[in-house]
Image: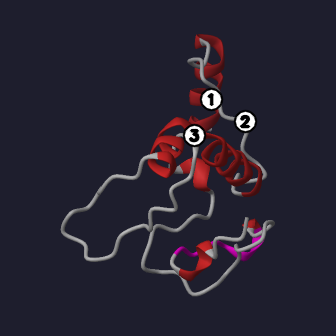
């Protein structure tokens, strides 16, 4: 599915593993580099499956590709594989355990 995302969205070249991504012109829509640092998969699924206006003051809108549920799930999975920073751990749905949070805080202070 080549949707030419980079016609509107910028994607850092090091993140461009899939068709329709990579560098590109972009700039009029959100930067998709390191997508999962910015968007939750469940939110992205809902937005792709049933798009809604997010910034009503802008004249540019994301096209409604009319993705069915299966297509939206596939696209979110594809973006999840391609747009994750290589050094980041997988996204968790559960809270970080207290002992890990303490270790992260200690590491951040040093």
Image quarter hosting the N terminus: bottom right
Q: Which residue is mark 1?
A: 104
The quadrant where residue 10 appears: bottom right
Q: Which mark is residue 45?
A: none
Residue 83 percent across, percent down from the top left: 69, 57
By what rule are the colours in the image chosen? secondary structure
Residue at position x 75%, y 70% from top?
16
User: In the rendered view, would you say 71 is above or below 15?
Assistant: above
Mark 1, Cα crowd under 10 Å, few <14 / some 14-19 / many 20+, is few
Frontmost residue, 57 versus 84:
57
Mark 2, Cα crowd under 10 Å, few <14 / some 14-19 / many 20+, is few
Residue 24 percent across, percent down from the top left: 64, 84
Q: Which mark is residue 41?
A: 3
User: Is label 3 or label 2 in front?
Assistant: 3
Q: Which residue is mark 2?
A: 90
The earlier-in-sequence mark between 3 and 1 is: 3
């Amino acid at each position: 599915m080549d949707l030419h995302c980079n016609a509107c969205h910028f994607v850092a070249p090091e993140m461009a593993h899939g068709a329709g991504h990579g560098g590109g012109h972009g700039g009029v829509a959100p930067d998709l580099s390191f997508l999962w640092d910015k968007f939750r998969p469940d939110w992205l699924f809902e937005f792709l499956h049933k798009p809604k206006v997010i910034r009503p003051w802008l004249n540019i809108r994301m096209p409604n590709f009319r993705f069915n549920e299966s297509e939206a799930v596939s696209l979110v999975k594809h973006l999840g594989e391609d747009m994750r920073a290589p050094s980041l751990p997988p996204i968790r749905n559960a809270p970080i355990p207290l002992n890990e949070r303490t270790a992260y805080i200690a590491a951040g202070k040093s």
